[in-house]
Amino acid sequence: MSDLLERLRGRGWRLTSQRRVVAEVLDGEHVHLTADEVHARAVQRLPEISRATVYNTLGELVGLGEVLEVATDGRAKRYDPNAHHAHQHLICSGCGAIRDVHPQGDPLAALPVAERFGFVLSGAEITYRGLCPDCARRP
């Protein structure tokens, strides 16, 4: 479970009703919603929230480092509230579903020194791809 709301309160980020609703929609495990999906869910909770407010709030959350922006193969960007928990992503090549995964080992150590070209490594993003159970069952 993401601790997004708790982190935002701890930072003293002003939680207006609109910001709170966006954060509540994003809060959870394996949440990777598009901005339009965030807006659609936010409207269910707060009908007067505008699309612009949702986009602006998402931009602020990304800027604060509290939400990750995940781009996948030309699809709409998705927003991941698990910004402070080390993880990688598993993406369905069929429907685009995304799951957080926690592979064992240090991905930085997995890159041989000869393949680093003198770079000092600071991070690694690994994306696993495959078909989710629903897409794998489709003919």
Image (tube, rainbow, N blue to C red):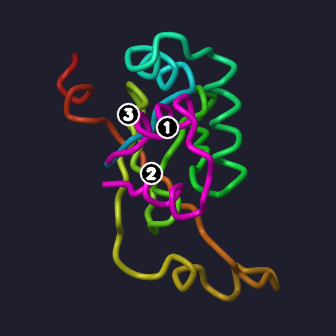
Q: Is residue 70 left or right of residue 31?
A: right
Task: State whether residue 60 is above or below residue 107.
Answer: above
Distance of label 2 from label 1 (alpha carbons): 8 Å
Distance of label 1 from label 3 (alpha carbons): 25 Å
Q: Dividing the picture into quarters, in which one does residue 135 lie?
A: top left
Is 15 covered by the magenta stretch? yes
Mark 2, residue position: 5
Is 27 covered by the magenta stretch? yes
Q: Earlier in the sequence, mark 2 or mark 3?
A: 2
Callout 2 amino acid: Leu
Q: Nearer the viewer, mark 2 or mark 3?
A: 2
- Count the labels in the image: 3
Q: Earlier in the sequence, mark 2 or mark 1?
A: 2
Task: State whether residue 114 is above or below residue 99.
Answer: below
Q: Residues within 10 Å of mark 2 (few under 14, many from 20)?
A: many
Q: Is residue 71 left or right of residue 33?
A: right
